[in-house]
Each structure stands twice: as C-alpha cells, then as structure tokens.
Image (cartoon, rainbow, N blue to C red):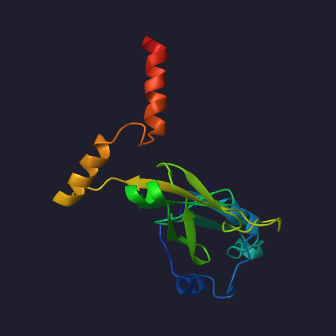
Amino acid sequence: MAVAPETSALEITPSLDEVRALVPEYNTVPLRQSFIDDCETPVSAFLKLRGEGEAGYGGGPQGDLYVVIHVQEHEMFVRQDNDVIIEAPISFPQAAVGTEIEVPTLDGKVKLKIPAATQSGKILRLKGKGIVDLHGYGRGDQLIKIVVETPRSLTPRQRELLEEFAKLDGKAVNHPLSKGFVDKLKEMFG
C-alpha cells in the first residue's frame, strides 16, 4: 500500500466515536463476514474498500479506504478454524478418580465430566460449542485440553499419603505411560 507523501501512517486504536468523527457520513462501513472469519489470532490484515475514501482531486472519483484489522488474542480461548480450544487444570486426585468441573464456553459455563484415569494432555470435546460456520453449516466444537497439576507444596499428611501411595505394589497401581516407557527401554537394550 502506497502512502501519499503529504500523509503519514500512524498506528492507532481509535474508538468507534473517533472513527465516526473522522468519517462523519458513515455510521458503519459494512465488512464481509468472510474476511473477518478468515482472520485468526494474532493477525494484522488490511481491508481495501474501493470508493469509500476521501473525495478525489479536482472532482475526481473518491479514493479507497484502507481498514487495518487487528484480532486481539483472548486470554483463555484460542481459535482453530471453527473450533475453540482452552486448557483446564485439574488435580492429580481428580484425574485419577474422575470428577466433574465447570468450564467456560462462548455461551457461558457448562459442566464437563472428567473420566477416571484421565492423563494430562487428553483433549475432551464439547460438540457445537465453537464458532458458527460462515456458510451456515453448523458450528465448531470446543476442545478442552486437560492439564494435570502437581502441587507445589504439601502438608505433612498429604506427603505421608502420597509416599504411602508410591510404595504400593505395582499390581495395585496402574501407570500406563511408565509401563510403555519401560517396555520401550527393554526393547532397545533387551
């Protein structure tokens, strides 16, 4: 985009009232929804609106209006096509025995059942809780990535219980990831 020598480009974030003051004859400038939907975070894109700029010199045609669109990242939700992704932290006991947690969605909070033996990194799906498809073909999903948190500090009783848990017979405790790791080591060095 060429900028006329007598003008300068400034990066500003004007309010809607400031935009209306700059372009008083327009309350709104229609944007194609498809353009906005194609903008994934973080993005900086230009939209050219032909004939919507200032009047031309000497009675010439109106110039073009360039709109810079910045899609701001959300602190919790990440967009991937029509799907929305969030991370949900749970404790080790919740992951081991299962629980029900409340998760935020674009439509408000919902209860999500976490099955027993859920591993960190597992992705659970809420059908139809994502972004509405541009062409009207349904709605994306919300994906919840489970993050099992390890406590940073323990009470003496909690530490005692965890040490007792760790001493249990390997047959009584199922460690699916560590067994796979040990089996791979045996194959390599077997």
Q: Position of residue 101 (x, y in %)?
A: 50, 69
Left/right placement of residue 135 relative to residue 189 reads right
Task: Tell me which residue sits at (63%, 83%) in the image.
Answer: 23
Q: Position of residue 84 (x, y in %)?
A: 61, 62
Left/right placement of residue 136 relative to residue 161 reads right
Q: Nearer the viewer, residue 87 or 47?
A: 87
Residue 170 vertical placement versus 107 (above, below): above
Q: Nearer the viewer, residue 68 or 111?
A: 111
Q: Nearer the viewer, residue 42 or 24?
A: 42
Image quadrant where one finds the N terminus: bottom right
Question: Which corner quadrant of the image does residue 169 belong to?
Answer: top left
Residue 137 vertical placement versus 178 (above, below): below
Question: Which corner quadrant of the image does residue 17 belong to?
Answer: bottom right
Residue 156 visible in the picture: yes
Task: Tell me which residue sits at (74%, 73%) in the image.
Answer: 62
Q: Nearer the viewer, residue 101 or 139?
A: 101
Q: Position of residue 67 (x, y in %)?
A: 63, 68
Task: Tell me which residue sits at (57%, 87%) in the image.
Answer: 21
Residue 91 visible in the picture: no
Question: Which corner quadrant of the image does residue 108 belong to?
Answer: bottom right
Q: Position of residue 117 (x, y in %)?
A: 50, 51
Residue 93 vertical placement versus 182 (above, below): below
Image quadrant where one finds the C terminus: top left
Left/right placement of residue 185 relative to residue 112 reads left
Task: Tell me which residue sits at (54%, 50%) in the image.
Answer: 122
